[in-house]
Image: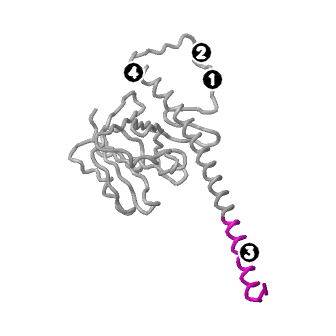
Amino acid sequence: IYVTPELKRKRRLYKIQFFVAVLLACLLSSYYIYAEYDRNKSEEVSQVLLSEVKSFDDTTKKSTKNDAIIIVLSEEEANEEPEVNTNEITNNEITVGDTTYTTEAIITIPKIDITYPVLSQTSDELLEISVNRYWPPKGKIQLDEIDNYCIVGHNYRNGKMFGRLNELENGDIVEIDDLTGRTLKYVVYKKYVVQPDDTSCTSQHTNGRKELTLITCTNYGTERLVVKCKQIW
């Protein structure tokens, strides 16, 4: 077969295209592996926070239940320095490594089998660690004083964080432990999708009804999935 210059040119072009395709496949695979590794590391931090918050919550519940009274027996005991572990918890502040996180609640959704600490602020960095409080935006809170408590979380394809939030249906239960010894229960009553700039779901005008709003990305980040819940206990 006579190899024409045009055929040679096409062969070179095919080789270049094949090389570029292989290179892109390697880069995409490396990115996916790194992203999954990063998500797993963030999940580990979240679980450490959850463990510490649960420990604090259990202690609070026991103290509330038993109405415990602490008595200092001696001046020496009063002056003793307490032991500090690597995951120190002071009130609702927990230090993991070199970073201190402020938590305010634990969210549990039995239907999709998730339990996460709710961090008290919202940022890109904190959303990598756990679900975040979105409203109210600042300051300490009392859930009984908030008409619409809003929580945001990432929609991960592996189902972590709010990755399975779309599976919730009307009647499903969401629980919030508020770290004062109480477990508040909410029931899902509405689910819908909005544009990213539509924040009407965070409105505090609820006619006095206590609500919980869960928000995550959907449709490849182009829209927001909103799950509305009302307090039943």
What amino acid does circle 1 point to?
Answer: Glu
What is the distance, in whole Å, between disc 1 and disc 3 at their CAs? Answer: 70 Å
Asked whether residue 55 is drawn in magenta, I would say no
Q: Which residues are magenta?
A: 1-24
> Whole-Å distance between the Cαs marked 3 and 2?
78 Å
| 89 w.r.t. 6: above or below | above
Foreground: disc 1 or disc 3: 3
| Dot in front, 4 or 2 | 4
| Secondary structure beneath label 4 | helix
Q: CA distance from mark 1 to mark 2?
A: 9 Å
- x%, y% of residue 233? 28, 32
Q: Secondary structure at mark 2?
A: helix
**For residue 146, what is the image quadrant?**
top left
The residue beneath circle 2 is: 77
Q: Quadrant of the N terminus?
A: bottom right
Residue beneath disc 1: 81
Q: Please report whichever mark, 3 or 2, sits nearer to the chain's N-terminal start.
A: 3
Specify few, some or many for label 2: CA neighbours under 10 Å numbering under 14, 14-19, or 20 or more.
few
- Say which residue label 3 marks: 15
State left or right for residue 60 relative to residue 9.
left
Kind of residue indicated by mark 2: Glu
Say which of marks 4 and 3 sits in front: 3
State which tag comes first along the sequence, 4 or 1: 4
Where 22 sits versus 77, above or below? below
